[in-house]
Image (spheres, rainbow, N blue to C red):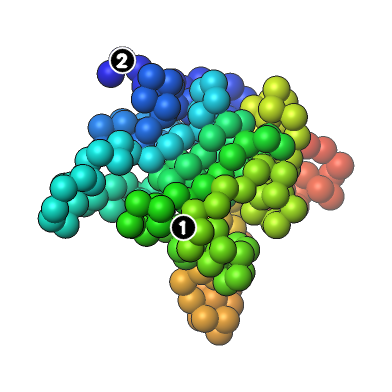
Amino acid sequence: MSDPVAVEVERRVARCTIADPERRNALGPELAEILIGTLERLDADDEVRVVVLAGTGDFFATGPDIRSYSGSGRGPASDTAMAGFWERHRALAKPSVAAVAGWALSTGCELALACDLMVVAKDAVFGMPEITFGLIPSGGATQRLTRALGRARAMELILTGRRMTGGQAFDWGLANIVMDRRDVLDQAVMLAEEVAARPPLALRYAKQAVLAADDLGLTAGLERERELFGAALATEDRVEGIEALLEGRKPDFRGR
């Protein structure tokens, strides 16, 4: 496999492209390890504030080769590797934008769901087909779809294996922006640049606070929000942001 993940950085936005069209951008263990390693490096890069994750051609990303699950037994060892992938992905601190302009099936759909924002093509295709061959999702779809769409819609998609278009994903509140396929990546980058203009530490704290809503009850979530507000209050960027507002100038946020 040669260069299955390409990266371009401009104006503090990293465009990370999954480029393995021969395998339909299938997120098996090898590609997943390359991808998460790339995302972790970008997460540690001070020149990057937001990551845009895109696919190539007709595919955002798809699941691993189903033939790896054939035969008897509990399944391939790759399942353990993918569990580690999702744990590492959830630990990424910087905001991410999924640019979905094609097929996002199985693990690929879960990857889009795991991003913080989503820009989709009207004719993009999402789906969790695992039920049709005797499995269930294992990368978070049962939890993220339920939280994003509600129990009824999540049950429908997961129990039937039906597919959902990008237009439906937007109408149901799963995507932030829907548009023609040719404009998806540009719009995702524009959204990422808007986010990247915000103070980087506050972005991290805000992301943590929103994600806490998935894991904590209301009382604990509000307490976590107050803790993160206190952390933001102690930053130099907070001082800069308020002074810039009062002085009528553009702020210079430095992540301190």
Q: Is residue 214 above or below residue 178?
A: below
Kind of element beneath mark 1 = helix
Which amino acid lies under the numbered mark 1 shown in the image of this protein?
Answer: Ala
Can you tell which quarter of the image residue 156 is in? bottom right
The single residue placed furthest to the right in the displayed view is: 248
Tell me what residue is drawn at x 55 percent, y 25 percent: 58
Asked if residue 189 shows in the view, the reply is: no
Task: Please indicate, yes or no, whether residue 69 appears anywhere in the rendered image.
Answer: yes
Residue 24 rendering spot, x and y as whole percentages? 42, 27
Residue 73 sits in quarter = bottom left
Q: Which mark is residue 141?
A: 1
The residue pinned by badge 2 equals 2
Amino acid of disc 2: Ser
Query: In the image shown, does 166 or 13 lie closer to the viewer?
Result: 166
Can you say which quadrant of the picture contains the N terminus? top left
Query: Which residue: 33% across, 57% down?
Result: 135
Dot 2: element: loop
- Which mark is first along the chain, 2 or 1? 2
CA gap, disc 1 and disc 2: 29 Å
Q: Would residue 248 appear left or right of 62 to someone viewing this image?
A: right
* Horizontal and vertical percent position of residue 194: 71, 38
Return the residue nearer the eye: 165 or 216: 165
Foreground mark, 1 or 2, reads 1
**Residue 61 image offset from top left, x and y in percent:** 46, 35
Q: Which residue in the rendered view is the most extreme toward the top?
A: 2
